[in-house]
Amino acid sequence: MKGKTLLYLSIVLSMMLAVVPMSSVKGSPATVLSIEPPLVEDTVPVCNNFTVDIYVTDVVGLWAWKVNLTWDPAVLEVLEVTEGPFLSGQASPTAFVVAPFDPATGFIPEISCGSIKVPAKTATGSGVLATVKFHVIAPGECDIVIKDTVMIGPPPSMDPLVYTVEIGHFKLSPPPPTSPEAIFTPLTCTMVYVGDWVTLDGRASTDGWDTLPDPPGGHTVDINDYKWLIDFLNGTTVEMHGDYIPDAFQCDKPGDVAITLTVNATDPLQPDHSDYEPIDSETHTIHQASKPMGVVIDVYTEKGGEGLGINWDADPPVQWPWSTAWSDAFAPQEEVTVYAKVTYNNDSVQNKPVAFEVKDETGTGVVYRTVFTDADGIASFTFRLIWECNKTFTTNYEVWEIWASVSVSEIEKLDVVKFRYGWLVQIEEIDAPGQVDKPVKPENFVAFEVTLLLKNLIHWPSNNKAVYITVVVYDVCGVPIAVAKVPDLLVPEDAYYWDPIFTLLVPPWTYRGTGMIYANIFTGAPQDGGVPVCSEVSTPIWLGRP
């Protein structure tokens, strides 16, 4: 029975499309069938996904609708089309149809939906009819077009509704000439014991991108040589080649070793762009240390802090050797796992009680524990960071300490690890124009840019995370007039401050006056269970002519 209903709906919509002249969908601005957001520009990189909605605004008595969809298959690929909540929320049950299509053609012949409720029910208002998920294949731009559209009222008359149609647009500018980047391990400040072997791994290095001689796009330039220079800082240097060299050299005595990786990505296609540099180098300094003798205790967290390390709280950060190890940062209410490894002449000490004390920003002890070491000489426990009802970060973050002490054969040893406590990614400031004019013509939009100044407390590469950033603009009457969002934006681990830029569009129906810009960072889309990463930040903006 349901299959017959679906077939009936499809036939009815096809008949309506055939008999309704295209002029009947023009002339009234009250109801709009559109792609939202209308512009996706330079916010979604290649190999990432984004969604747009087929959206209806201010419709009255919608019973069924039908569109087809076109796009440029050289730039985008449609992954899926799902029903939106608007019609089903008011006129359920509904029949939703997506005709079979080949993504390579850039065309879906039919996306349609109608109420199959008896007696007939309709939907009124504004909302999402369907959501289309795209995958970005390559830089470029194209229109996202809904055409051959039909929206009709309920039977028996099934009168065509009067509305206007607005298409969407996608744009991703080609990347500029980009030199290769040398990226490798071991990282700076890595501690290696005398007698251990060091492996050189440059496979994370990135290839170059040259835009000549084939504009306006470009092409990847593969790295064709990995050159390593190991400087033992005593007059001895060793040169090696290869992207990955296991057991490259053995640490023979305490001291520093400077390791330089130079990558070469010479473009065989000439000429090069003047901004393309085919060679890049990176130097890391590691520390060779004698294996600890006697009683040693080392306290750290699941986010690092073993041995010695970098003082991230200094400006600029103090490099090796820093006497106090630092773990990476923790967020409010996050659970912290603390470890303390106890050794004697580098052998694990089992079943020894270890005392722990956790101190907050003021130096006040807030956690005290006694834990025995296991078979590997490690004592561990967990605690969740305190978050009072009126908690704020007046200096953006706090510095906490974890102390551990032990006694072996009446020899007492202690160690400390520090970490920063605060929002892992923070919105420091919203940089936006003080005034944005409304469009003069009712069919136009006015674009403006918003820059977010973000602070990053994360430093260790293993803790890189993607975030979901949104910027919403309200007008003076509290109407959300524009929104920009970037899903799966990777937080750069090596940037203390960074500043993504968003483009927003002021529509002609904006109320003139002082509006507000609201910026938020989530772990993912809230509808997918994403939660806030930090507090919301807002700033006023004047919309319209003064």
Image (cartoon, rainbow, N blue to C red):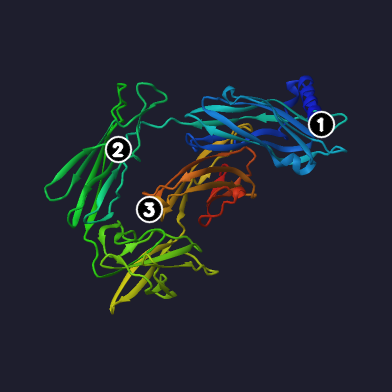
Q: Residue at x 32, y 63 (%)?
A: 325
Q: How many marks?
A: 3
What numbered label is drawn on residue 5? Answer: 1
Which of 75/504 is in front? 75
What numbered label is drawn on residue 402? Answer: none
Residue 58 against residue 217 in the figure, above or below: below
Give the secondary structure at mark 2: loop
Give the secondary structure at mark 1: helix
Kindly indicate the quadrant of the structure image that contains residue 268. top left
Q: CA distance from mark 3 to mark 2?
A: 22 Å
Q: Are marks 3 and 1 in contact (CB under 8 Å)?
A: no
Image x and y of residue 192, in percent? 26, 55
Q: CA distance from mark 1 to mark 2?
A: 61 Å
Residue 314 against residue 362 in the figure, above or below: above
Q: Mark 2: which amino acid?
A: Asp
Q: Mark 3: which amino acid?
A: Trp
Image x and y of residue 22, in percent? 73, 21
Mark in front: 1 vs 2: 2
Kindly indicate the quadrant of the structure image that contains residue 348. bottom left
Relative side of 303 to 474, left or right? left
Q: Quadrant of the C terminus?
A: top right
Within 10 angstroms of label 3, few (less than 14), some, or many (20 or more) residues? some
Q: Mark 1: which amino acid?
A: Thr
Residue 7 against residue 493 in the figure, above or below: above
The earlier-in-sequence mark between 3 and 2 is 2
